[in-house]
Image (cartoon, helix red, strand yellow):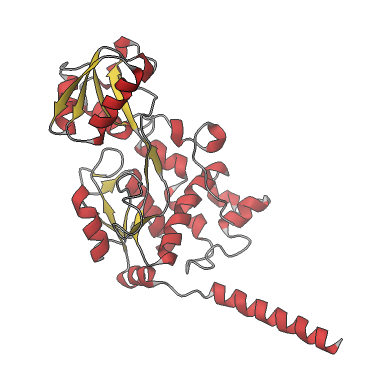
Amino acid sequence: MARHAFLVVLATLLAVAGQGAVAQTEPGPTLAQVLKRGYLSCGVTDAPGFAQPDGTGNWRGFDVDFCRAVAAAIFDDPDKVRYLGLGVRERGQALQSGWVDLIAGAGPWTQSRDGAQQHVLFAGVSFFDGQSFLVRRQRSFASAQDLSGLSVCVQQGTSYELELADFFRMRKTPYESKLFPSFEEAARAYEGGQCDALTADAAMLHGARAKFQSPAEHDILPDLLTKAPHGPVVRQGDDQWLMILRWALFALIDAEELDLSGAKVDAALKAEAPRIRHFLGVEGDRGAGLALAGDWPYRVIKHVGNYAEIFERNLGQGSPLGMDRRVNALWSKGGVLYAPPVR
């Protein structure tokens, strides 16, 4: 009996010590650098709705708000971010050199972009995209399956050109491809009536349509010819930093599912529902293992809002881009957006 009692006491002490070790997790190299610097350095690429400077030079957009969410989790202040505008070819070098702590929205997640080849890791998918078609509303096309015998403007030498050819070849329907050196030139040609449709990723099509003189006269068809998942990217070698970004993204999605918005989150601190209490850190320590404050999800939602709020103000019907949620809706509302629970 004495031996049994000793083992019970020993197990209890080890468990308590283990809990203390988790609670006292030290910042990893990236988080330590961010804390020492006093702000987050975030790489963004200029794209309508995702990241663009406004008239006063302040960056706004969907990707920008993700950076603000990470800053809120770390500093309880979403404005402690410095943004570095990067071209497509500059992103990898900026991340590997330490100029930025993350890339908020890199190119689509593919095998060649993930892992050893570029020494980066995707933290998750923040936006599901894919190639689609922009057409004139007066043509009354319901889907891409209705397209036949049309001329299509497309950027030359891109995967869009190849996917376009594959799409019509598989359907055995005629089309004419009109090639342009850049997407911007293809979009201008389409608006000017040189072709019947424009193809690229749906987000690019929404951005182009927003700049047209009569955006309401054009529709983006619901079909996606390809998969192009986008999300935040970090350097390899710092698991803690990867987890911080991953769970910041998950928190935005879970908050929408829990109906926790920026306006409701303070009142939710008094909620009795266990899922909400665990999420907000009222019960349990959400910062354990991340070296963050225990209520970091509350900070994120209070300062930035949930996924739906971020989408709506930057990309949704209340924005110039006028996107529907479609595939980016929650899994429970017809989309594919899903996140593990923050608990």
Residue found 27% across the figure and 60% down from its top = 95
Residue 134 rendering spot, x and y as whole percentages: 29, 23
Residue 257 rendering spot, x and y as whole percentages: 56, 42
Residue 126 rendering spot, x and y as whole percentages: 41, 45
> Of residues 180 and 255, which is closer to you in this image?
180
Task: Locate the C terminus and report the quarter of the image it occupies.
Answer: bottom right
Camera sees residue 87: no
- The residue furthest right is 1
* Figure check: 262 above or below 240: above
- The residue furthest bottom is 2
**In which quarter of the view is residue 246 placed?**
bottom left
> Of residues 80 and 45, which is closer to you in this image?
45
Camera sees residue 83: yes
- The mark tally for this picture is 0
Residue found 37% across the figure and 72% down from its top = 29
Left or right: 9 in relation to 208: right
> Of residues 301 and 88, which is closer to you in this image?
88
* Figure check: 250 above or below 215: below
Task: Locate the N terminus and report the quarter of the image it occupies.
Answer: bottom right
Residue 196 rendering spot, x and y as whole percentages: 23, 16
Residue found 81% across the figure and 84% down from its top = 5
Left or right: 112 in relation to 75: left
**In which quarter of the view is residue 52 placed?**
top left
